[in-house]
Image: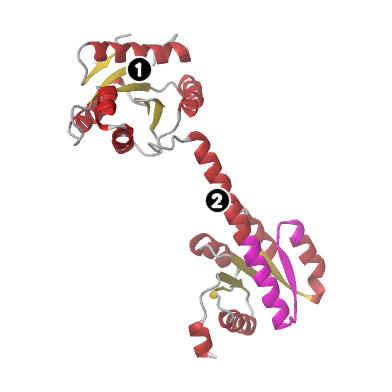
Amino acid sequence: MEKSIARKDVKGRILIVDDAPDTLEIIQKLLRYEGYNVALASTGEEGVKKVEEEKPDVVLMDINLPGIDGTEALRRIRILNPLQCVIMLTAFATVDNAIQALKEGASDFVKKPFENEHLIHIVNQCLEKYKTLKEKERLEDEVRRLSVTDDLTGLYNHRHFFKTLEAELVRLKRQRTSLSLMMVDLDHFKSYNDRYGHLEGDKVLKNVGEIVKHSIRHNVDSGYRYGGDEFAVLLIGASMDRAMTIAERIRSSIENTEFQNITVSIGLSEYRDPLDLEGFVKSADDALYTAKHAGGNRVHRNAR
């Protein structure tokens, strides 16, 4: 038997929550032989904790547990992971409780004493269901990501810029915090494209995207490909002085890349009442225009 276990690939991660040592041992051996990685818990609280820490694919849990019972543990587990597949174990006398657990979000239930093959079948079914749900969630996340992301640079796209800016302006007025906007435009990009070709031009745009991402705060600020060779950056809670520091970091990083004659002009604006969304964007655009027509490779701040 041990050799067979060693040969099997791990099918999935199972957590068994039961306060009966004999039941834990029997199910553990059974599922390990089937190729599962098995973790154990003997109370509802311990089961919930292990779900949070170990993220099993399937939870096999007795309804009657010391401390919080299986139904309450199920509720807490579903809060941690709404997709979590949980199979309830129940004695004949608590089938009504098992049906209630199904209403609370349990995937299935198995009556004690159970037949080994039936238990394995239910666990296998739940594992496949969980994998399907996780893949569906992953695909939905990917669709959402692609809908707001520029394929070439990995930054957010033009449409998402305006949605985010609108939301940030609402938050700014509610919380009375700072918001700075940076507009970035590549200098000499058309001539670079004409000389080296569009594939090389795409490499420049990707590189600029990477520099922007690494120059701003992850999950706080946000970078966008605004269009063509123009980029935008929203700096949340940033004063003009802070924005100038970040803009200069981006400008100098791009100047020092391997791409010959590629530099950037940057326009900065810090939000001031009574600007609306369009007026705020125009103020940063005006600063960019000034930087561009002063020779490029510089940062200009809007004095408004």
* Residues tagged 2 and 1 counted as in contact (Cβ below 8 A): no
- Is 267 drawn above or below residue 10 in the view shown? above
Q: Which residue is mark 2?
A: 138
Q: Where is the N terminus found, in terms of image quarters? A: bottom right
Q: Amino acid at mark 1?
A: Glu
User: Residue 245: which quarter of the image?
Assistant: top left
Q: Nearer the viewer, residue 68 or 13?
A: 13
Residue for point 48% across, 23% down: 162
Where residue 90 appears, x then y in whole percent? 74, 73
User: Residue 99: which quarter of the image?
Assistant: bottom right
Residue for point 66% across, 56% down: 75
Magenta span includes 127: yes
Whether residue 227 is visible here, answered yes or no, is yes
> Which residues are drawn in magenta?
102-130
Where residue 170 appears, x then y in whole percent? 51, 21
Magenta span includes 100: no
Residue for point 56% across, 49% down: 139
The circle drawn on residue 270 is 1
